[in-house]
Image (cartoon, helix red, strand yellow):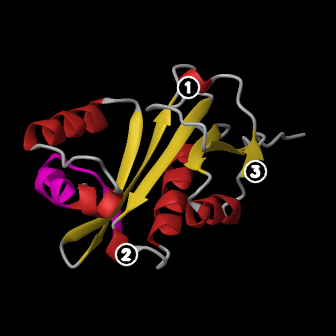
Amino acid sequence: MLIRDLVPEDTDLLFALIGPDDLNMVSPPTRETMARFMEFFLRSTSLTSVAEVDGALVGQAQVRFNANGATAELSYATSKRHRERGVATRLAQDAIRRARLRTPAVEIWAKVAERNPASIRVLEKLGFEPAATTDPAFFSGKLKDEDRFYRLPARPRPTYL
Protein backbone atom coordinates (compact mmCIF):
# COMPACT_ATOMS: atom_id res chain seq x y z
CA MET A 1 0.00 0.00 0.00
CA LEU A 2 1.27 3.42 -0.99
CA ILE A 3 0.27 6.51 1.00
CA ARG A 4 0.80 9.74 -0.90
CA ASP A 5 -0.50 13.27 -1.38
CA LEU A 6 -3.70 13.81 -3.29
CA VAL A 7 -2.95 15.31 -6.72
CA PRO A 8 -5.26 16.80 -9.39
CA GLU A 9 -4.86 13.71 -11.56
CA ASP A 10 -6.61 11.65 -8.84
CA THR A 11 -10.08 12.98 -9.71
CA ASP A 12 -11.19 9.81 -11.53
CA LEU A 13 -9.63 7.53 -8.90
CA LEU A 14 -11.30 9.48 -6.10
CA PHE A 15 -14.57 9.38 -8.04
CA ALA A 16 -14.27 5.58 -8.11
CA LEU A 17 -13.55 5.47 -4.34
CA ILE A 18 -16.34 7.76 -3.15
CA GLY A 19 -19.72 6.25 -3.88
CA PRO A 20 -22.92 5.02 -2.26
CA ASP A 21 -21.80 1.41 -2.04
CA ASP A 22 -18.40 2.09 -0.53
CA LEU A 23 -18.78 5.03 1.83
CA ASN A 24 -22.47 4.82 2.79
CA MET A 25 -23.44 7.91 0.83
CA VAL A 26 -27.12 8.59 0.13
CA SER A 27 -26.56 9.31 -3.54
CA PRO A 28 -23.55 8.91 -5.79
CA PRO A 29 -21.48 12.02 -6.41
CA THR A 30 -21.40 13.47 -9.92
CA ARG A 31 -18.18 14.23 -11.77
CA GLU A 32 -18.97 17.94 -11.27
CA THR A 33 -19.24 17.38 -7.52
CA MET A 34 -15.94 15.51 -7.53
CA ALA A 35 -14.26 18.32 -9.45
CA ARG A 36 -15.47 20.79 -6.79
CA PHE A 37 -14.24 18.47 -4.01
CA MET A 38 -10.84 18.23 -5.67
CA GLU A 39 -10.63 21.99 -6.08
CA PHE A 40 -11.49 22.44 -2.40
CA PHE A 41 -9.07 19.73 -1.23
CA LEU A 42 -6.21 21.14 -3.24
CA ARG A 43 -6.76 24.84 -2.45
CA SER A 44 -7.84 24.73 1.17
CA THR A 45 -5.76 24.85 4.33
CA SER A 46 -5.91 21.08 4.53
CA LEU A 47 -3.50 18.23 4.01
CA THR A 48 -5.06 15.38 2.06
CA SER A 49 -3.50 11.93 1.61
CA VAL A 50 -4.69 8.89 -0.26
CA ALA A 51 -3.93 5.19 0.06
CA GLU A 52 -3.37 3.38 -3.21
CA VAL A 53 -3.30 -0.37 -3.89
CA ASP A 54 -2.68 -1.72 -7.39
CA GLY A 55 -3.47 1.65 -9.00
CA ALA A 56 -6.79 2.13 -7.18
CA LEU A 57 -7.50 4.48 -4.29
CA VAL A 58 -8.67 2.54 -1.25
CA GLY A 59 -8.84 5.37 1.27
CA GLN A 60 -8.28 9.02 1.96
CA ALA A 61 -7.46 11.11 5.02
CA GLN A 62 -7.52 14.80 5.55
CA VAL A 63 -6.47 17.24 8.24
CA ARG A 64 -8.21 20.61 7.97
CA PHE A 65 -6.63 23.40 9.98
CA ASN A 66 -8.83 25.84 11.86
CA ALA A 67 -8.36 29.53 11.07
CA ASN A 68 -6.12 29.99 14.13
CA GLY A 69 -3.84 27.12 13.04
CA ALA A 70 -3.68 25.76 16.59
CA THR A 71 -6.44 23.18 16.06
CA ALA A 72 -7.31 20.86 13.21
CA GLU A 73 -9.94 18.29 12.30
CA LEU A 74 -8.99 14.79 11.15
CA SER A 75 -11.27 12.80 8.86
CA TYR A 76 -10.68 9.59 6.94
CA ALA A 77 -12.54 6.99 4.92
CA THR A 78 -11.70 3.63 3.39
CA SER A 79 -13.45 1.49 0.81
CA LYS A 80 -15.53 -1.34 2.25
CA ARG A 81 -13.29 -3.90 0.56
CA HIS A 82 -10.24 -2.57 2.45
CA ARG A 83 -11.64 -2.12 5.94
CA GLU A 84 -10.21 -4.03 8.91
CA ARG A 85 -6.81 -4.13 7.16
CA GLY A 86 -5.12 -1.18 8.86
CA VAL A 87 -5.70 1.28 6.00
CA ALA A 88 -7.53 3.84 8.16
CA THR A 89 -4.93 3.57 10.92
CA ARG A 90 -2.02 4.10 8.52
CA LEU A 91 -3.77 6.99 6.77
CA ALA A 92 -4.63 8.67 10.09
CA GLN A 93 -1.06 8.16 11.40
CA ASP A 94 0.33 9.75 8.25
CA ALA A 95 -2.12 12.66 8.46
CA ILE A 96 -1.20 13.34 12.09
CA ARG A 97 2.52 13.14 11.31
CA ARG A 98 2.16 15.59 8.43
CA ALA A 99 0.02 17.97 10.48
CA ARG A 100 2.59 17.99 13.27
CA LEU A 101 5.41 18.61 10.81
CA ARG A 102 3.53 21.69 9.63
CA THR A 103 2.39 22.84 13.09
CA PRO A 104 4.13 20.91 15.89
CA ALA A 105 1.80 22.03 18.68
CA VAL A 106 -1.49 21.46 16.82
CA GLU A 107 -4.39 19.92 18.75
CA ILE A 108 -6.27 17.48 16.50
CA TRP A 109 -9.97 16.72 16.81
CA ALA A 110 -12.13 14.06 15.16
CA LYS A 111 -15.81 13.30 15.17
CA VAL A 112 -17.08 9.77 14.78
CA ALA A 113 -20.50 8.14 14.81
CA GLU A 114 -21.15 6.17 17.95
CA ARG A 115 -22.24 3.26 15.72
CA ASN A 116 -18.74 3.07 14.19
CA PRO A 117 -16.66 1.12 16.73
CA ALA A 118 -13.89 0.37 14.20
CA SER A 119 -13.24 4.08 13.70
CA ILE A 120 -13.35 4.67 17.45
CA ARG A 121 -10.68 1.94 17.84
CA VAL A 122 -8.50 3.69 15.23
CA LEU A 123 -8.70 6.97 17.14
CA GLU A 124 -8.04 5.37 20.53
CA LYS A 125 -5.10 3.38 19.12
CA LEU A 126 -3.58 6.68 17.96
CA GLY A 127 -3.94 8.33 21.38
CA PHE A 128 -7.20 10.24 20.92
CA GLU A 129 -9.34 10.67 24.01
CA PRO A 130 -13.11 11.14 24.21
CA ALA A 131 -13.90 14.82 24.67
CA ALA A 132 -16.79 17.21 24.87
CA THR A 133 -16.79 20.07 22.45
CA THR A 134 -18.15 23.52 23.05
CA ASP A 135 -17.78 24.60 19.44
CA PRO A 136 -19.56 22.24 17.03
CA ALA A 137 -19.18 24.85 14.28
CA PHE A 138 -15.52 23.82 14.14
CA PHE A 139 -16.44 20.47 12.57
CA SER A 140 -17.21 20.14 8.89
CA GLY A 141 -20.51 18.70 7.79
CA LYS A 142 -23.72 18.34 9.72
CA LEU A 143 -23.53 17.12 13.28
CA LYS A 144 -25.80 14.29 14.37
CA ASP A 145 -26.88 13.19 17.82
CA GLU A 146 -24.78 10.04 17.44
CA ASP A 147 -21.58 11.98 16.75
CA ARG A 148 -18.89 11.65 19.39
CA PHE A 149 -15.83 13.85 19.65
CA TYR A 150 -12.24 12.77 20.18
CA ARG A 151 -9.20 14.91 20.86
CA LEU A 152 -5.49 14.33 20.41
CA PRO A 153 -3.82 16.87 22.69
CA ALA A 154 -1.16 19.15 21.34
CA ARG A 155 2.33 18.00 22.12
CA PRO A 156 4.14 20.60 24.16
CA ARG A 157 7.02 22.27 22.45
CA PRO A 158 10.36 21.18 23.86
CA THR A 159 12.00 23.65 26.16
CA TYR A 160 15.73 24.07 26.25
CA LEU A 161 17.72 25.16 29.26
Which residue was labeled with disc 1?
138
Asked whether residue 10 is drawn in magenta, I would say: yes
Mark 2 and mark 1 lie on one chain; the one further toward the N terminus is 2
From the top left corner, tell me how far across and down residue 50 is, in percent: 33, 59
**Residue extent of the magenta highlight:** 1-16
Which residue was labeled with disc 3?
129
Mark 3 and mark 2 lie on one chain; the one further toward the N terminus is 2
Task: Specify the amino acid type for callout 1.
Answer: Phe
From mark 2 to mark 1, how far is it between C-alphas?
A: 29 Å
Is residue 78 or residue 144 the one in the foreground? 144
Asked whether residue 15 is drawn in magenta, I would say: yes
From mark 3 to mark 2, how far is it between C-alphas?
A: 25 Å
Q: How many marks?
A: 3
Which residue was labeled with disc 2?
82
Screen quadrant of the C terminus:
top right
> Is 26 left or right of 96, judged from the image as shown?
left
Quarter-of-image position of residue 72: top right
Is residue 24 or residue 33 the one in the foreground? 24
From mark 3 to mark 1, how far is it between C-alphas?
A: 18 Å
Location of residue 160 with respect to 61 vertically, above or below: above
From the top left corner, tell me how far across and down residue 87 is, in percent: 44, 71
From the top left corner, tell me how far across and down residue 65 is, in percent: 50, 31
Location of residue 65 with respect to 13 vertically, above or below: above
Task: Specify the amino acid type for callout 2.
Answer: His
Secondary structure of residue under mark 2: helix
Task: Specify the amino acid type for callout 3.
Answer: Glu
**Residue in the picture at 35% in, 70% down:** 80
Location of residue 26 with respect to 77 vertically, above or below: above
Res. 51 mark: none
Location of residue 133 with respect to 49 vertically, above or below: above
